[in-house]
Image (tube, rainbow, N blue to C red):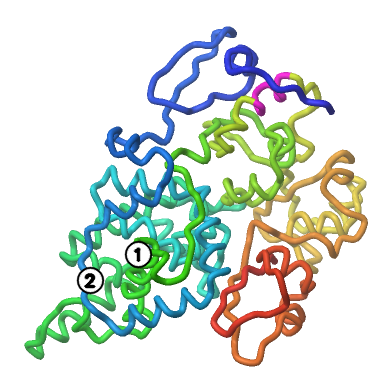
Amino acid sequence: MNFERSSLLKTLALILFFSITTSTQSETNALGQKITVIGQENTDIKSQTSYKYSIWPRINNGYQMKQRPSRRIRNYETWYSKRPEYFQRMLERSEKYLFYVVGEVQKRNMPMEIALLPMIESAYNPIATSRKKAAGMWQFIPSTGKIYGLKQNWWVDDRRTVMEATNAALNYLEKLHKEFGTWELALASYNAGEGRVGRAIKRNKRNKKPTGYYSLRLPRETKNYVPKLFAIKNIISNPKKYGLDLPKIKNEPYFEVVEVVKNIDTQLIARLSEISIEEFQLLNPQYKRPVINVKNVPEKINLPYQNIHIFNYNLHSYKKPLSNWNAYKPKKKESVAQVAKKFGIDRKILIQVNRLERRKSFRKNSTILIPNKDAITTYFPTNLNELYNYSSIITHKVSPGQTLSHISDKYNISVKDIKEFNELRSDRIIIGDTLDIPK
């Protein structure tokens, strides 16, 4: 379909199904539809305008934590400076989310070091999943995510949601700071758990020893946690000192929020927005299915700021169904083969789209997606082995002796796909590097 572009006024007059959120005021469009604007604003308007062209001065001027000379910090400064491609890729990845995170940290008057925390948690990768089942750029484990209101079900995993997970993480960190009294101890508790840090403090009190972060007996990873954060802070503060360059990241929103009020396919959203499906998934990593399921309240999606109006105009021109998927609850003892036959689709496709692996029957109270013919043609290549689940990513740390070929065999993914997904220019990998592996 040949989609046209439209001006802002024309776009607002053509919105049918969605409310766009881009400022704090409300207005009514030409169709009588109310548009509420909530946007990514910051309470300190002066600080935003003074850093109009770059986010980095705004970040550097917001630091509050004091650091003391440390061998651990120097070691991590060296580690990052020897891996310029990894460091550059991590900062470039943060571009989509950094403005929002910085704004939320600043609203709460928290140290700006906190905005850099996802760099050591996930390298600012919202689709990262650890071996301990922590997910998202803030790496919430399932139980902590539920405590802080992050929904996790068959359709979505809000631990990966950019806005909700950020606010949950900041709530958690504020609670830890109130409990332990310093940001160093709050960060240690975020990493190791408040119980472990609390026990370490009690142990030092019994032995009449200091109870600050640097005096506690903590796991090695936790002892390195704050120094690692300070190393990143120091490099961003003075990249030339370490032989590195910072990517140009503007001090302005990358994305805005659209409220979806009807079921709609994620591929269709990307198509109408004129963005890639990968771009959509990186901005909306919480959605686990190829269709956004809307129940009683609208679902919120993020789209690039400059593509909002393109999306709305193209949506008005689109006359076909918004979704090519139907949710189905299998009956008791109904098998995969029976459901595939009932709906006239290939059993392999049913297994693939619902991640059923080789299960012959469904679990109790299961929900599955049934694609129609258009969905099968659109979503599935001829070779089903080409399908990867980009909504779930494994982070792999390179061990001594490993090559891309070893890693390729381990995860059953081609070397070419590993290189493309991680933007590697050669087959050369370094011990300690982190690679993202799509399932």
Q: Which residue is mark 1?
A: 233
311 is within the stretch colored magenta: yes
> Which one is nearer the viewer's eye here, 143 or 40?
40
Q: Compared to 243, does 26 lie above or below?
A: above
Q: Is 319 positioned to the left or the right of 29 in the image?
A: right
Q: Quadrant of residue 100?
A: top left
- Can you say which quadrant of the picture contains the N terminus? top right
Answer whether labels 1 and 2 touch (C-beta < 8 Å).
Answer: yes
Stretch in magenta: 310-316
Q: Quadrant of residue 140?
A: bottom left
Q: Residue at x 64, y 29 (%)?
A: 262
Q: Residue at x 72, y 74 (%)?
A: 426
SS assignment for the magenta stretch, majority? helix
365 is within the stretch colored magenta: no
Q: Which residue is mark 2?
A: 67
State how far apart marks 1 and 2 are (Cα). Answer: 11 Å
- Can you say which quadrant of the picture contains the C terminus? bottom right
Q: Earlier in the sequence, mark 1 or mark 2?
A: 2
Query: Which residue type carries mark 1?
Result: Lys
> Which one is nearer the viewer's eye here, 387 or 314?
314
Q: Residue at x 55, y 75 (%)?
A: 131
Crowdedness of circle 1 by 10 Å Cα count: few (<14), some, many (20+)?
A: many
**In the rendering, at what x and y percent does residue 284 appear?**
58, 46
Q: Is 296 positioned to the left or the right of 210 in the image?
A: right
